[in-house]
Image: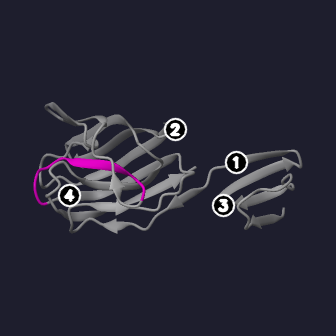
Amino acid sequence: MSILALTSDTLIGTAAAGQIEYNGQFYGTDSNASRAQMQRIVQETAQATTSGTSKDFTGIPAWVKKITIIFNEVSGNASSNMLIQLGTGSTSYTTSGYLSTGCVTTTSAVSGGSSTAGFFMFRDTASYGVSGHMVLTNISANIWISSHAAKISTTAIINGGGSVTLGAALTAVRITTVNGTDTFDAGSINIIYEG
């Protein structure tokens, strides 16, 4: 099987049989007349969540349709819940228009919260460390859907979901807190994205 890398901005003619990489995306062909886009999965470099009030992942390509945020024992110095905000352009993050709800389930109770400023993740105790995933999926145009599930202690789990319509194509993800001033003090975080 041959591999061809295209360096032009435009596909010209019909793709040859084999595999083609074009503009960061992979295509598989079974004949000279057909071409099907294949998903490409990219893992970014993990960031330590041991300091700072937010962690940003930028430069997300326009072809991305799904992003998985991975939390590894992420905690903060106080009790503000977590918030995930989506960015467009180089430095602009959407801080309104989200429809987002999250809850915590323990062995004895269920509590919850919501936010219009970002995708809400329940974590109301400073000692809690979040381990789990939030999945962001593009449903059409610039509309993104979130869902998450994680553990925050040995006796509590969190889950939730939401939606937001961005004003332009998604290019970045920010992980922060509802009050924006609590600082991270343990753990790490990363993202995986795909087309």
Instruction: Please name the amino acid that badge 1 sits on.
Output: Gln
Give the residue number, with chain letter if any, for mark 4: 75
Give the foreground label among 4 and 2.
Answer: 2
Instruction: Please name the amino acid that badge 2 sits on.
Output: Ala
Give the foreground label among 1 and 3.
Answer: 3
Counting residues from the N terminus, which is met first, the one under dot 2 or under dot 3? 3
Counting residues from the N terminus, which is met first, the one under dot 2 or under dot 1? 1
Give the foreground label among 4 and 3.
Answer: 3
The crowding category of the residue bearing disc 2, from other C-alpha atoms within 10 Å (few below 14, some 14 to 19, many at least 20), is: few
Q: Position of residue 176 (x, y in %)?
A: 24, 55
Residue appearing at x 48%, y 48% in the figure:
169
Residue 86 belongs to magenta span = yes
Magenta range is: 77-89
Proximity of marks 4 and 1: CB atoms separated by less than 8 Å: no
Q: Is residue 157 left or right of residue 146?
A: left
Give whichever of 15, 2 is nearer the camera. 15
Q: Marks 2/3: CA distance? A: 20 Å
Residue 128 tag number: none
Q: Position of residue 60 (x, y in %)?
A: 48, 58
Residue 37 tag number: 1
Instruction: Please name the amino acid that badge 4 sits on.
Output: Ser
Residue appearing at x 33%, y 52% in the figure:
93
Asked if 48 appears above or below 33 in the picture, the reply is below
**Mark 2: which secondary structure?**
loop
Counting residues from the N terminus, which is met first, the one under dot 4 or under dot 2? 4
Residue 153 visible to the viewer? no
**Mark 3: which secondary structure?**
loop
Give the residue number, with chain letter if any, for mark 2: 141
**Mark 4: which secondary structure?**
strand
